[in-house]
């Protein structure tokens, strides 16, 4: 694997990268291309893409009572996206749906212990709910997850937070979304830069173990329960990385700060993503083995979101815009109408453990999956108004 600081130094020829500081110093001033000032940093709520995102969300919340929706990572991604959709559109129905979900599950917090990155994820939408409603129950969800991550989560010798409470500790690319967004969203909510620094430290550690010279991230480090085939890269895992990494850089930019090393890493991952896009606009579930598996919706949506965010912030130039538009067109082919004419997100692969090529190839796809719905809404909102 390529050391992340080395990646940053190699990328220093770019006008976005000013130099190579110490791995712990993420708070560089400036760092955004002047072209970014010509683009809107926020999505436009008055577009066809946002209208489609709302129609997808409207159908989902009509068909699924919030009390019936589970309390895990996939559901947390969806609720995070719904609270974001409320913020962008001003429509309170999506936030209120997430509130009913949280109210139901926080009646007996003892039923939801935090013991892994995945079980910490409900804190992400609860950060927004605490902001909007100031309810101690939502703050309690956030505090319990942060307490686990700060004090109880097993760590690798270099400090990486383990995906599961296992010995030896294991790092999964997924975790950069599931616990990473807690740090990012909490920092945005409170102004606590130390939480951004926590994300930056974890990203560096994860990249030092997981990021391949090709730019792709392998699924897991130190995963002893299954053999991972070399040179096999799972789409959605890389999608979580670019989605969370660009969100982190977005919050840095709000503070007129940048992060040289993580910018370089995300750029290298973006190059790999762009080079592997299928003519359909979508991506394969094993991203570097075209035609050998299947085109997968959630990974494609997360790549679209990440590329669009990087483009908005000036990390990527105008040459990427055609690829983003192809991706949006491809995603729309994965949205089909139900018997009532309402849009349903199809083609999302199921929960996936690290393994060899056949592990990823054999995961079945389903429709109307929480995290697939969330990823598509996320992508549609992010591309609106580009």
Image (cartoon, rainbow, N blue to C red):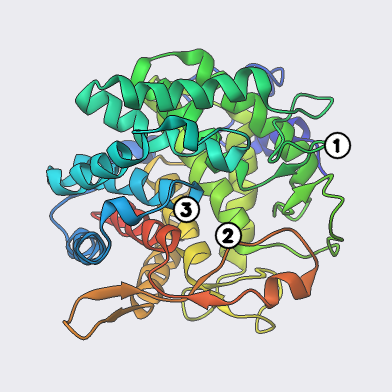
**In the rendered image, which residue does mark 2 sit on?**
236
Query: Vertical placement of 33 versus 385: above or below?
Result: above
Within-10-Å neighbours for mark 1: few <14, some 14–19, many 20+: some
User: Exactly how many numbered labels are in the figure?
Assistant: 3
Residue 284 lies, in percent from the top left, at 60, 73
* Quadrant, the N terminus: top right
Is residue 259 visible to the viewer in this orientation of the structure? yes
In the depicted structure, whether residue 198 falls above or below residue 323: above
Q: Residue sitting at 63 percent across and 16 percent down? A: 25
Give how far across and how far down residue 97 sits, in percent. 22, 47
Q: Earlier in the sequence, mark 3 or mark 2?
A: 3
Quadrant including the C terminus: bottom left
- Disc 1 + disc 3, Cβ < 8 Å: no
- Do the residues bearing badges 3 and 2 touch, measured as CB atoms within 8 Å? no
**Residue 74 - label:** 3
Q: Which residue is mark 1?
A: 168
Marks 3 and 2, how far apart at CA: 12 Å
Disc 2 crowd rating (10 Å Cα; few below 14, some 14-19, many 20+) is many
């Amino acid at each position: 694997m390529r050391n992340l600081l080395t990646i940053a130094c190699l990328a220093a020829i770019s006008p976005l990268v000013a130099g190579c500081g110490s791995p712990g110093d993420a708070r560089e001033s400036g760092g955004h291309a002047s072209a970014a000032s010509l683009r809107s940093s926020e999505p436009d709520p008055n577009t066809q893409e946002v209208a489609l995102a709302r129609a997808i969300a409207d159908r989902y919340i009509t068909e699924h009572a919030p009390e019936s929706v589970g309390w895990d990572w996939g559901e947390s991604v969806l609720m995070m996206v719904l609270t974001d959709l409320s913020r962008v559109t001003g429509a309170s129905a999506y936030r209120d749906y997430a509130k009913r979900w949280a109210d139901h599950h926080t009646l007996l917090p003892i039923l939801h212990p935090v013991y892994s990155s995945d079980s910490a994820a409900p804190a992400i939408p609860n950060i927004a709910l605490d902001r909007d409603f100031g309810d101690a129950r939502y703050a309690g969800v956030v505090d319990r997850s942060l307490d686990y991550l700060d004090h109880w989560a097993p760590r690798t010798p270099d400090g990486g937070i383990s995906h599961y409470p296992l010995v030896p500790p294991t790092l999964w690319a997924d975790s950069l979304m599931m616990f990473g967004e807690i740090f990012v969203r909490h920092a945005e909510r409170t102004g606590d830069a130390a939480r951004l620094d926590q994300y930056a430290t974890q990203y560096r550690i994860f990249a030092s173990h997981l990021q391949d010279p090709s730019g792709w991230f392998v699924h897991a480090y130190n995963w002893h329960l299954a053999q991972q085939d070399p040179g096999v890269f799972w789409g959605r895992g890389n999608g979580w990385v670019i989605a969370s990494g660009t969100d982190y850089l977005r919050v840095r930019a709000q503070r007129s700060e940048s992060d040289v090393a993580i910018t370089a890493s995300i750029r290298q991952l973006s190059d790999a993503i762009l080079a592997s896009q299928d003519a359909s606009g979508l991506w394969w579930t094993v991203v570097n083995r075209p035609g050998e598996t299947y085109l997968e919706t959630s990974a494609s949506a997360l790549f679209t979101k990440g590329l669009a965010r990087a483009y908005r912030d000036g990390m990527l130039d105008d040459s990427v815009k055609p690829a983003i538009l192809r991706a949006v067109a491809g995603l729309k082919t994965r949205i089909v109408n139900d018997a009532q004419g309402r849009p349903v997100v199809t083609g999302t692969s199921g929960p996936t453990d690290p393994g060899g090529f056949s592990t990823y190839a054999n995961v079945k796809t389903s429709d109307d999956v929480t995290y697939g719905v969330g990823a598509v809404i996320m992508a549609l909102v992010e591309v609106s108004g580009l």
